[in-house]
Image (cartoon, coloured by chain):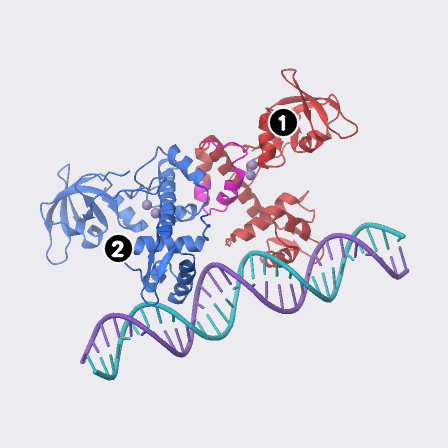
Chain colours: A blue, B red, C cyan, D purple
Amino acid sequence: MEKSLSLTEENYIKAIFQIRRTPESNVSTNSLANSLQTKPATVSDMIKRLSHKKLIFYEKYKGVTLSAAGSKQAIKIIRKHRLWEVFLVNHLNFKWDQVHEIAEQLEHIKSSELINRLDDFLGNPTTDPHGDPIPNANGQFQLGPSKLLSEMTSNENGIIVGVKNENSLLLQHLDKLNIHLGLNIKVKEVNDFDQSMQIKLADSSTLFLSEKIASQILIAKKLRSYL
Amino acid sequence: MEKSLSLTEENYIKAIFQIRRTPESNVSTNSLANSLQTKPATVSDMIKRLSHKKLIFYEKYKGVTLSAAGSKQAIKIIRKHRLWEVFLVNHLNFKWDQVHEIAEQLEHIKSSELINRLDDFLGNPTTDPHGDPIPNANGQFQLGPSKLLSEMTSNENGIIVGVKNENSLLLQHLDKLNIHLGLNIKVKEVNDFDQSMQIKLADSSTLFLSEKIASQILIAKKLRSYL
DNA sequence: ATTAATTTTTAGATTAATCTAAAAATTAAT
DNA sequence: ATTAATTTTTAGATTAATCTAAAAATTAAT
Ligand SMILES: [Mn+2]
Ligand SMILES: [Mn+2]
Ligand SMILES: [Mn+2]
Ligand SMILES: [Mn+2]
């Protein structure tokens, strides 16, 4: 009974899922246009179609929210995206900064049989190469509490569990600094003027990070547990 | 400099490559329409576009042939299709009759880096699960001499090296008969009336095959060697 | 509470891919 | 060599996805 979406429709649904703060918060036309690199007029049109298909709730000038059906589709796409990323990194030796673009294509391959077998082949991973949780076949995934490194204050500590952004330049920069998932860190000092910070690693070495970078790194008290 | 083709364009180029007998022989509008499950009028339109892009040579009412650029593209797509089929069968435990449809999607994923790494990951296989040769990264592949089982006469023998068709029902039927690639066979008798035949296997057991099935099985004197 | 700025929608076009129906060209049959 | 049958193309429409320009609605600023 679940009608198959076009590639474009899938990208819209996924973008809405990713942009919104909470499941209830509305996503604006402009933010979608921005995220999908298209024009607001185009978004307005597509929104009507998705609304007609009952994938989103839409009130003119008030933005959109995902319906249950829409969320389900979004989670499916994200599951595929992240599983393919694991495959690319773990089995084809890609670096974590090289896989996003390819996964953007692979996430649209239609075959639940395929994705479930891939999941098994990969050993049912619970996080992708960027620390993001991978939904299981039922679409369930649990996101442990985490916050941005930039929100931490002096002497707080925690573990790096993810990056907010998959921009290649950022990921390469983190590589250069030897910052990776699972790393234990402690905030030594936060600069009042520009919010840059010094952090201490487990081996007692210290690192200097700009606010721009610190605001892309997700920290948790302990490693997040997923379904 | 190589402009990227749309999914539809890729399917046309591949169909032309697969339908033609020799690189020079013309492919008709109707045969393309038939193969692509579309209407002749649609094919006429698309043909103009591909011709304009210099991927095919086209003369009105005379059918089309692939240009060098077109052939190159076709071979790339076929390479991807077959490598993905190997992945699906060898690593995700799909049966040979289950992979074609999924590979039809995967063959359009754009990333030569991806496909070359996949090739390495798979151990640079030379044939796909159906016995078809896999072009290498330069697009070269060598097709050893082979003919249809239905073209063989009494007492001729050879090795099954491929199937012409990837229809699930055919492949499942062959499975049931225990007919697989690499099998040594000998033609015992050909029925004059319906061209059905009895073949003898290495273990001296015999099998009855209709002409319809025999005309789908490719036989070679020895296993084909590929680049 | 008006006015100004911003956001969103509508109107009208365009392109790729598709279709049906009819016309034109080619090929096969008498 | 005509006529008939078949194949291919053209003409005219449609749908999804996109755009620019202008209108309408909402939100922010005085
Ligand atoms: Mn990604
Ligand atoms: Mn990721
Ligand atoms: Mn296939
Ligand atoms: Mn195959």
On screen, residue A181 versus residue C27, left or right, reads: left
Q: Is residue A134 visible?
A: yes
Q: Which residues are magenta?
A: B93-115
Q: Is residue B24 magenta?
A: no
State how far apart marks 2 and 1 are (Cα).
59 Å
Q: Nearer the viewer, residue A129 or B174?
A: B174
Residue behind mark 2: A21
* Residue shown at 9% from the left, 48% from the top: A154
Q: Ligand 4 shows up in which quadrant of the image?
A: top right
* Residue shown at 58% from the left, 57% from the top: B53
Q: Position of residue A110 (x, y in %)?
A: 46, 45
Query: How many neighbours does mark 1 have within 10 angstroms: few (below 14), some (14-19), or many (20 or more)?
Result: many
Chain letter of disc 2 in the image: A
Q: Nearer the viewer, residue A26 or D8?
A: A26
Q: Considering the numbered disc 1 on the image, is that residue within a helix, a strand or a loop?
A: strand
Mark 2 within 8 Å of ligand 2, using the beta carbon: no
Q: Say which of marks 2 and 1 sits in front.
A: 2
Q: Is residue B112 magenta?
A: yes
Check chain identity for marks 2 and 1: say if they share one: no
Quarter containing the C terminus of chain B: top right
Q: Quadrant of residue A16?
A: bottom left
Q: How many labels sit on residues?
A: 2
Q: Quadrant of residue B201?
A: top right
- Residue B51's place in the image compared with A185, above or below, is below
Query: How many neighbours does mark 2 have within 10 angstroms: few (below 14), some (14-19), or many (20 or more)?
Result: few
Amino acid type at image mark 2: Arg
Q: Is residue B180 visible?
A: no
Amino acid type at image mark 1: Ile
Residue behind mark 1: B160
Q: Position of residue B224 (x, y in %)?
A: 61, 29
- Residue C16's place in the image compared with B190, above or below, is below
